[in-house]
Every structure is written in structure tokens, then in C-alpha cells.
Image (cartoon, grey):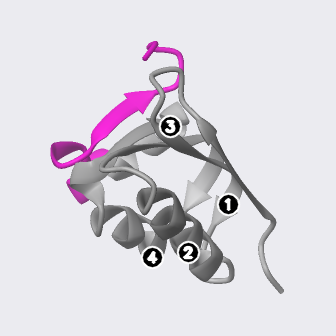
Amino acid sequence: MSTPLTLRTGLHSDGRPMLIVQGEIDMSNLAAFDDALAATLSEATSIVVDLSGVDYLDSGAINALFAHAERLHLICNPLLVSALRISGLTELATVEPLGTGS
């Protein structure tokens, strides 16, 4: 059974394509997340990924983000910041905890 995950696209206030993610990202829905990430990245050299509605992501999701880290601006739930920092993703991608403004 797949963990509930909602993926939508839109435009960020700065005009960049944005992938809006809500739910949990784990191995049951990782392919859908990775496909949406790749499709959104095909539209621009950099994108915004809004993870503010994500409470949990597993190592597969972090690896999917790592694959494109230098092209990502992540807006994330403050609960995820520690995992992203420990993984080293904050050294490669722009990571903005929700509520700090963009």
C-alpha cells in the first residue's frame, strides 16, 4: 500500500517552477516523487520544492533530492531541517525552513 502523497506544480513568487509536496515520502511513493521532481526540473535550470507539508521523508527521498541538489531551493517543514543538515544536503541545496521568508 502506498503512503498518501500529493504532488502539485505551480510557480513560485520569483517565477521559477515549483513542486509542492504534501504527505510523507517513502519507498512506496518514491518513484512518483522522483518523476515529479524530474518533470519540474525539465522546465528550468533551478526550481523551488515546497516540502512544508511533508512531515517525513526517508533516505530514498533525500537521495532523490541529492541528485539535483545544486538546482534546488527547498522550503521545508522545520522538523526536516535536522535530517537535511545531517545528510549534508544543506551544503549543496538552498534550504529554507518554513516561516523564514523567501
In primary-sequence order, the first of circles 1 and 4 is 1
In primary-sequence order, the first of circles 3 and 2 is 2
Direction from residue 30 to residue 82 in the image, left or right: left
Q: Position of residue 94 (x, y in %)?
A: 28, 37
Helix, strand or loop for disc 2: helix
Q: Position of residue 11 (x, y in %)?
A: 58, 34
Which range of residues does the magenta coloring cover?
A: 85-102
Which residue in the structure is indicated by mark 4?
60
Amino acid on which disc 1 is placed: Glu
Magenta stretch contains residue 97: yes
Q: Is residue 66 visible?
A: yes
Amino acid on which disc 2 is placed: Asp
Contact (Cβ within 8 Å) of mark 3 with mark 4: no
Which residue in the structure is indicated by mark 2?
35
Q: Nearer the viewer, residue 72 or 79?
A: 72
Q: Which mark is residue 24?
A: 1
Which residue in the structure is indicated by mark 3?
76
